[in-house]
């Protein structure tokens, strides 16, 4: 049983200053969702750090239960990061009118220039104002729809990537056989061939089968996550500090 504790400074605010039952405050709803988005990204970041910091790093050509679990979990984390980024962009696009309100601009102005610039970079991508990011955002949609959340429509794409990986790629130790592990518990059960299909699909989407989407766009993903972290937390700090009493 773990003994470490999560750290932070516990504060509070009256619930009525955030959301009122008798008022349809669109800005308040916007910032409530924004807080959920921040928590989701933080949870995934923590999950990734725990995996990388706890388990042995896999050797390049290693074929083992450990290698399958390690690679599969990191792939899962990557696709969830990608999906959350995509959902965040959709949320911003659907709430563009909120971003243009005087109330939101007043909150943004209470942050520093660095945060304001980071926020502009995010909204430029979300609102299609950044042409160079069009391929990246298009690929986010495909991964989110086909291998992250929409299981009901993922069969065709995953079948193709499975066949590409096991039948068309040069045979190496990892794709010579379709590996899996089945035990009596969830802990010792995983279907590694399914992870391989997802990894291949992400590489296909990125048009880079050797590296994969999360590697090809590693810089973009890292920058967006960093920008989301800093901007959302600072926006919420300014928002909470100035809520009417």
Image (cartoon, rainbow, N blue to C red):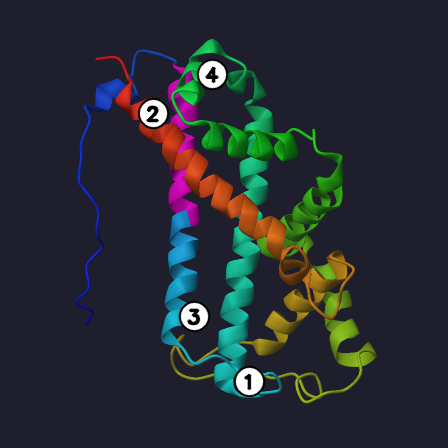
Magenta region includes residue 28: yes
- Where is residue 87? Give x, y as percent: 56, 40
Instruction: Give the Cα separation between the discs numbered 1 and 3.
Output: 14 Å
For residue 23, above or below residue 240: above
Which disc is residue 105 wearing? 4
- Assign the C terminus to one quadrant of the image: top left
Mark 1 = which residue? Answer: 59
Tell me if residue 27 is in the magenta stretch. yes
Label 4 element class:
helix
- Type of secondary structure dominating the magenta stretch: helix
For label 4, the crowd category at 10 Å Cα-Cα, with few meaning under 14, some 14 to 19 and many 20 or more, is: few
Which residue, given by chain and number where applicable, does mark 3 sit on? Answer: 52
| Circles 3 and 4 in contact, beta carbons < 8 Å | no
* Mark 2 / mark 4, whichever is N-terminal: 4
The residues tagged by marks 2 and 1 sit, at their Cα atoms, a distance apart of 46 Å
Quick check: 18 above or below 75?
Answer: above
- At x 68%, y 59%, the residue is 216
At 19% from the left and 59% from the top, the residue drawn is: 5
């Amino acid at each position: 049983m773990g003994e470490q504790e999560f750290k932070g400074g516990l504060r509070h605010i009256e619930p009525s200053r955030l959301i009122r039952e008798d008022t349809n405050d669109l800005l308040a709803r916007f910032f409530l969702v924004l807080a959920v988005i921040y928590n989701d990204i933080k949870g995934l970041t923590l999950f990734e750090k725990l995996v990388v910091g706890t388990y042995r790093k896999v050797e390049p050509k290693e074929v083992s239960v450990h290698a399958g679990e390690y690679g599969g979990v990191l792939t899962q984390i990557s696709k969830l990061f990608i999906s959350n980024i995509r959902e965040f962009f959709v949320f911003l696009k659907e709430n563009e009118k909120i971003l243009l309100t005087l109330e939101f601009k007043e909150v943004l102005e209470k942050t520093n220039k660095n945060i304001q610039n980071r926020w502009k970079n995010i909204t430029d991508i979300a609102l299609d104002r950044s042409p160079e990011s069009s391929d990246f955002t298009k690929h986010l949609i495909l991964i989110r729809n086909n291998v992250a959340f929409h299981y009901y429509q993922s069969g065709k794409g995953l079948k193709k990537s499975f066949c590409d990986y096991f039948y068309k790629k040069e045979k190496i130790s990892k794709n010579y056989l379709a590996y899996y592990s089945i035990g009596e518990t969830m802990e010792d059960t995983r279907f590694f061939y399914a992870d391989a299909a997802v990894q291949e699909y992400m590489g296909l989407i990125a048009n880079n089968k050797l590296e994969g989407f999360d590697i090809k766009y590693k810089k973009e993903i890292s920058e967006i996550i960093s920008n989301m972290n800093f901007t959302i937390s600072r926006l919420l700090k300014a928002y909470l500090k100035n809520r009417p009493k």
